[in-house]
Structure formats: structure tokens, C-alpha cells
Image (cartoon, helix red, strand yellow):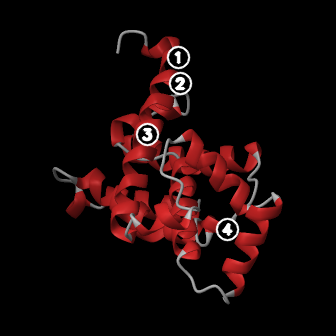
Amino acid sequence: MNSILEIKAIIEDCRVDTIGGIMTGIELWEMAVIPMMLNNCGTWDEIGEKSMKKLNQLQNNVLQYLLNTPRSTPGPSLSWEFGILPMEYRIMTKKLCLTKHIVNLSHNSLAKEIFVTQNELSFPGLSREITQLITDLNLPNILDPNVNKKWPKHKWKNLVKNKVWEKCEKDLQEKLKKFTKLDDS
């Protein structure tokens, strides 16, 4: 919250009170706070609903402060208007990119050994989550070495980004339909 209040103070400075001033706040959030908050989130396992709500509420607080909107402003509309991914989609992206990295490690690396063991024995962990994400997002199965070779890192990252944005858009539209405040929009 301190970071959010600092961003708000910077935005309220008269030098930023110009066209695009709010974007300065968004950039500060994206470049300073998000990396700190989501450091190593690709390894987070089975994140609880309560924790995800707190992360999303922090992001909504930033957007509400930047626009000076009331607390009753629907969170999905803020994400939609700013074009910002809710936290669960940011974490999804990080997990899928981390998996690509792990799958491409040498066979004697500890991370790959653990990942392969989780996958082969269906243990809980990143492997199980990734298998589900690959299915949900209709992504190529990079856990298969033949498929993995066809997807260089940069192409995989772009594909993941596009698929996550598609899912996010659909989910946000569904959430927005539930708010009577937004019936006219």
C-alpha cells in the first residue's frame, strides 16, 4: 500500500498533471511494484482464492487511486479499461514461461529432474498445473520433446501471451455481465 500511495503522490505532482499523466502511474506500477510483488511467482503452487483476491485488490486499488474512483467501482471494468491483466493471468504467463525454461534445461539439472518426476508420477506441483493450463488455453504440449523443439522461446512467449489475453478477455467479459452498474456499457 505504501508503494501505491507513493505512486499516487507522484501522479498528483503538477509536472505530471498533463495528458498521459495516468500512464506514468501505470508504468511505475508495472515496472517497480509488479516485479517486486510477483518475484518468482512461476514457482508458486496452488495459490489460494483469498491470496489471489488480495493481489487483485491491490492492483484495483492502484487503478482506483489513479482515476479517483470510488471503492465500489467494479474491478473487472478497471482491468478492461486499462488493458491490464489481473494477477491470476500474470501468474499463468510466468508459470508457462518458466516451464519452457525448465523443459529446455539439461537432463542432469535438478529443476528438470524434479519437473520430469512430477510429470511422470503425477505428483502435485508445477507439472500438474502446467498440464491443466496447456489444456485450458489450448496450447501445444511443450512437455513433449518433439513439440517443444518446434517452439523457440520467443515464439512460445508470444503464443502464451496471446492465449492468456484471449482467455482474460473472455473471463472479464463474463464478469462484467454480472454487474448491473455496467448494463449500459
| Distance in Å between CA atoms under marks 4 and 3 | 24 Å
- Give yes or no for contact between labels 4 and 3 (Cβ–Cβ under 8 Å): no
| Distance in Å between CA atoms under marks 1 and 3 | 14 Å
Residue at 72% x, 85% y is: 110
Q: Which residue is mark 2?
A: 175
Q: Nearer the viewer, mark 1 or mark 4?
A: 4
Find numbered disc 4 in the image and state the secondary structure of the residue it sits on.
helix
| Distance in Å between CA atoms under marks 1 and 2 | 7 Å
Residue 105 quadrant: bottom right
Q: Which residue is mark 1?
A: 179
Q: Position of residue 5 (x, y in %)?
A: 50, 59
Residue at 34% x, 62% y is: 155
Look at the picture and state if 71 lies above or below 10: above
| Distance in Å between CA atoms under marks 1 and 4 | 34 Å
- Give yes or no for contact between labels 4 and 2 (Cβ–Cβ under 8 Å): no
Q: Mark 1 or mark 4, which has the lower sequence index?
A: 4
172 or 9, which is in the foreground? 172
Q: Mark 4 or mark 3, which has the lower sequence index?
A: 4
150 or 161, which is in the foreground? 150
Find numbered disc 1 in the image and state the secondary structure of the residue it sits on.
loop
Residue 10 quadrant: bottom left
Q: Amino acid at mark 3?
A: Ser
Q: Nearer the viewer, mark 4 or mark 2?
A: 4
Find numbered disc 3 in the image and state the secondary structure of the residue it sits on.
helix
